[in-house]
Each structure stands twice: as C-alpha cells, then as structure tokens.
Image: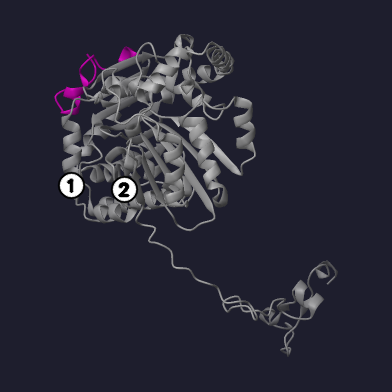
Amino acid sequence: MGYMAGLSIWRTGPRLLSGVRGFHTSSLRQITLSERIFGTTSIFKQDLIKPFVGSPEPNYVAGEDPSKPAITKLDNGVRVVTQDFGRPMSAVAAFVDISPRYETLETAGSSYMLEKLAFKGSSKRPPVQVIRDIENLPASFTATASREMMASCAEGLRYKSKDILTALIESSVLSRPMADVSDYETKEYIQEELTAMKALLQDDIKEQAENAQLIILDALHDAAYNGRTLGHPTIVTDSMLKKITPESLHMFMMELLTGENIVISGCDVDHDETVAVVSEMLGHLPKGTSNRSRLPPKYTGGEVRIRSEDQARIAIGFEGYRWEDKEIVAQFVLSHLMGGGDYFSTGGPGKGLLTRLYTDVLNRHHWVNSAITSNLLYADSSVFAIQMSSFANKMEDLTETAISAAQSLAKAPTPVELERAKRQAIGNMLANTDGRLVTCEDLGRQVSIYDKYTTPEEFVTRIEKLTATDLKSVGEKLLSSNPSVALMGDLQTAPEQGQFKSMLTGGTKSIKA
C-alpha cells in the first residue's frame, strides 16, 4: 500500500465476497485527492448550467443585423464599408489601386518600396514621431503590396478605433513619398530615407531571388498576360531599386492616388465615425480614376522556361472567370475538388486527402513533392492553375503527370466528390470569414472590385445549388483556353515549345520529340 500513499488510497466495497480468491476488483473505488483533503467527492457545488446565486441578470441589447454592411461613397469617389458585430476589438483596412500591375520599366519596384515605407513616416509627420505614436496605440499594423492593390490593415481595441484608423490612413495611404518633393529639404530627407531603406532590403531581395515558389508564380503570370499588367513581376531586383528616386515614387503614387481607387473598410467600428475620419483625411483627393488604372488585363497564354538545378517544377494555368461571372462559384468549388498539398500531411479530417491531386498524383507517385491547385482571382481576370514539383531528374514524368491532372478538369465529379468539394469549400470560406481582419479584408476587396458586398450566406446558397454538370462545364471551358505554362528545372526532357496545347487536347501522346 505504500506506493499508493502519495495521492490516493484504496478502499474495498461495503461487503467482501468469501472464498479463497478474495474479493472482486470491481468493488474497489479510488479516493481522489480532493476527497481526502476536503472530505467530499466534489469541490464545487454550483451547477455551472444554472445562473450563479445572487448574480445580476444580463442586460441583452439588440444589435443591428451584422449581415448587412453599411457602404458610403464620398463626393470624390472614396468608398467606406463597415460591418459591426458589437465586439470589443476592431479592425480597419485601406485598399488602394497601387500595385505592380500599374508599374512601368521606370517605376518597377515602386509598389514594393511603398509597402516597406508604410508606417515609417507620413506626408505630415517625420518617421520618428509616427513610429512613436503608433507604438503608443494598443494596435498592430501591417501593409502588403499584392499583384493588383496595396492593402494596409490594423487591429486593436474598439475604443481606440478612431485613432487607429487615423494612424493607418496617415502613414500608409498618405505615406512619406506623397510629400511635396519640389521642396529641396523634403526631397533630401526622403532621399536619405530611401537610401537607408534600400540598404536594409538587400537581404530581402536575395531571399526573393532564391524563393522557387515566388519565381514560378511570377513566371506563370508572365506567360498568362504576356508580361503586361498582371504579368508584371512582383519579385524585386537590385537594379529596380536603384532606379527609384523621390520624384519617380511621388509621381507613381500621385498618379494612382485618386478617390475611385481607394476603399476604407472596418469591422466592429462605428460607421458614421469612420466616414467622418475618412472624409476629413481623404476628402481632398481628386475625383475619378487615373488613366493607368483603367488598363484591363489581357489573357494570352504562353510559356516561360527557367533553367535551374533545383527541383523540377511546373505550373499550368488556364484563363478563368471574372468576379462578376456566375460561374466563378463553380470554379471556386472545382479548385477544392482538385485540391492537393505536399507529399506528407498529418492531422485530422478536412486536409483534402481525398481530393483528386492527392488520390491520383501524390498517393501514386512517390517522387512528386507537391501538387496543388491555385485559384488566382483578380478584379477583372483570373487564372486557374495546377502546380507540381518533384526530384530534379523527373521533369519528363512530372510534365506528363501534370498534363493528366489538368485533363481531369473536364471529368464530371461523382456525387461523393461533388458533395465533399462543396462541404470543404463552404467550411473553408466560413472559417476564413470568422476573424476580424479577414472579414475586414473581404469587405474592402469586394467593394473595391464590384462596389457591393455578397455575404457568406449568399455564397453558401449558390454553392449548394451547383451540380456535377456545372463543374464539368467550367472545367471544359478552362481547358479550351490557351494554356499558360511555367517550367523550372532541367529543361532537356521538357516538351517542345508550343506542344502543351496539343498534349492537353490529346493530340500528342508523348512529350518526347
């Protein structure tokens, strides 16, 4: 009994059974530590389902329907969209049509530089003061330059949401390069900041140049849009940074900084207060859109090949639907049906281990390192892509496998496949829209693209109505477009230039010349 004396002792039941074998072990009961100390089998007597005795009744307040965001358009075209769930934390974001899409050879890399200069000064205050004021706020700030817009986000306590929004707009939308560079002292000051920032970004530039995933994505967009608009590179080189001056950055920013190109979104904020702040800070900007921001992307398809000693990589893309097209929902579900991932995955259900790229590619070919589906959506275009990577000496096999996977887009899903893809698409969408920042981003992006907001519930309804025929039709439409192909690795065993179209349609059985 000595070894049990630490936390528990053993007691027999109310009676012992006679016999040479002693007593039944089922009659033993362990005395818990709380029973030994407090003399009871439970420390807590309060039923946690019932209200505590003497506690005040909660005062329930009926809030507005959170599914109906408020949208206001200022006289100069700036749009403000908010949605209030009544939570104590707030999120705000600013979306501006400033991105590599609108860059030229002279201004290449400007969007990247503006991203890095965000929250490090404004056109009204020097960097030291802005950084100090931001640090004193109970909030976190981020800025990202994507392929078609600049997004700045902040998250913090609700009672400080006005101050957070003010700091966000001043130090990102109205950032330092917006200052008048005609003034000699201001120009010299900004030049010093640019020089210091360029030196700090050297390591980041080297990392981008070695990131195979970024390289293959840039190559895919280059092939899809013939190196124009959405085909402009997002990877910045040192030669790009050397061309950036205070004047070029100022001109690039001011050309695109117009009312119609800006959307301010907020989650769990007061709408009228948000509109007042935006009107005061951005009401002076010119009305309308710039000529450059009206340039539409033109999908062409094509091929880009990059020699590398690293893994063999391939990305095959097809022209997809636009946001306003009703088929975009079927394209979204089709991406979940194709699915994919890395060669090794752990965890519970919901990882897509039964998607086509897993069952047809990763589970059958041990040499494939990754196989993923990418649904690259933009305001007025999209690319549906399949990406794969493998060992360096498997380029020929990898190409054939990618072609076969792409051809399966035209295959109608089984009832089980369709239902599984629907459930996963709905689950991922609802999970993503559960957070403040994601909801705030969704509000801003939707309003910036088609000037209205579609709720997750509406998307769920549209997803539920999809049939196997709908997905098959979308897959066939994707395959009918001119493919965009990016290859990276040992190209000696790659298909001949321009051979992919016939391979996808079944005209060429082998990639060997």
Give x and y (percent) for residue 481: 18, 29
Which residue is most to the left?
507
Residue 509 falls inside the magenta stretch: yes
Q: Could you tell me which residue is drawn at 20 percent across and 16 percent down?
A: 498
On the image, which quarter does residue 1 sit in?
bottom right
Left or right: 24 with respect to 261?
right
Q: How packed is label 1: few (under 14 Cα within 10 Å), some, or many (20 or more)? A: some
Instruction: Return the mark for residue 453.
Output: 2
Residue 396 position, x and y percent, is: 31, 21
- The quadrant in which the C terminus is found is top left
Q: Nearer the viewer, residue 396 or 59?
A: 59
- Residues 138 and 14: in front is 138
Give whichever of discs 1 and 2 has the lower sequence position: 2
User: Could you tell me which secondary element the residue under label 2 belongs to?
Assistant: loop
Task: Identify the residue under disc 1.
Answer: 470
Crowd rating for badge 2 (residues with CA inside 10 Å; few <14, some 14–19, many 20+):
many
The image shows residue 276 at horizontal and vertical percentages of 44, 45
Extent of the magenta region? 491-513
**Is residue 194 inside the magenta stretch?**
no
Q: Can residue 177 be seen in the rendering of this structure?
A: yes
Give the Cα separation between the discs numbered 1 and 2: 24 Å
Q: Residue furthest right?
A: 2
What secondary structure is the stretch in magenta mostly built from? loop
- The amino acid pointed to by label 2 is Tyr
x, y percent for residue 376: 32, 34
Q: Is residue 137 above or below residue 68?
A: above
Count the marks.
2
Question: In front here: 24 or 186?
Answer: 186
Q: Nearer the viewer, residue 509 or 476?
A: 476
What residue is rendered at 48% in x and 58% in y? 86
